[in-house]
Amino acid sequence: MRAYLKAELEQFLEAVDAALDRPAEVVLIGGAAAALHYGATRPTRDIDTWTTIHEELAQAASRARASTGLDVPVQHSGVADAPSNFESRLERVLPDLAVLVVFVPERHDLVLMKAVRAYEHDLEVIAEIHARFPLELETLAGRFEAEMSPIGDRIRIRGNFLAVVERIFPSRVDLVAQRLERVR
């Protein structure tokens, strides 16, 4: 399966915008969000959305594939987890689009979403986001404690979060681990 870089994602979304007959909103997550807003250079194989893809948007994406030759899958992610209040912090990207309004999670929220899985490629993207748009450890840890607690296997997710902290704040991982032990 082919992977796409930022310029190709932008070209594709511009074609989706041109193919729409009326306004539509979409919240992008994952690699597409990281590439479009935070400068991640790792290619992505698809555009994952937090929002459901309604029929008109699906048809516009189909027309965009035909007009650009970019066979970018656009799909609602059925397995994504996010901080409980992330939607209040969404950031708009590609503001010059005419009718398609594209949002992505704020950088700390996107990192927490990627931390749930914490595969090596997720950690690489997180490090790249941090290098370009430095993360604040207090914001990251505070949101993890306050907004990620109801999600999944708490022990696994805590370990994944500490792997993220170790990657981007290596000298602070022990302090964060102690902090998380106190709030267990």
Image (spheres, rainbow, N blue to C red):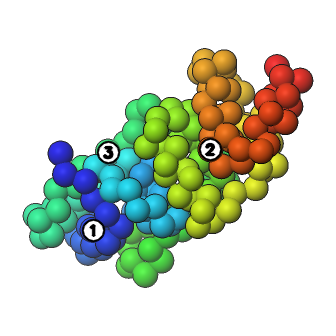
Numbered disc 1: secondary structure: helix
- How far is the residue under mark 3 from the one under mark 1? 17 Å
Comparing marks 1 and 2, which lies closer to the viewer?
Answer: 2
Which residue type carries mark 1?
Answer: Glu
- The picture places residue 166, in percent across and down from the top left corner, at 67, 40
| Badge 2: residue crowd in 10 Å (few <14, some 14–19, many ≥20) | some
| Badge 3: residue crowd in 10 Å (few <14, some 14–19, many ≥20) | some
Mark closest to the chain's N terminus, 1 or 2: 1
User: Can you name the residue that lies furthest to the front here?
Assistant: 171
User: Can you name the residue that lies furthest to the bottom here?
Assistant: 96
Taking depth in this image into account, of 16 and 110 the one nearest to the observer is 110
Which residue type carries mark 2?
Answer: Arg
In what quadrant of the picture does the C terminus appear?
top right
| Residue 141 - label | none
Residue 90, quarter of picture:
bottom right
- How far is the residue under mark 1 from the one under mark 2? 29 Å
Q: Residue at x 37, y 42 (%)?
A: 76
- How far is the residue under mark 2 from the one under mark 3? 29 Å
In what quadrant of the picture does the N terminus appear?
top left
Which residue type carries mark 3?
Answer: Gln
* Residue at the spot of label 2: 167
Mark closest to the chain's N terminus, 3 or 1: 1
* Residue at the spot of label 1: 8
* Residue at the spot of label 3: 75
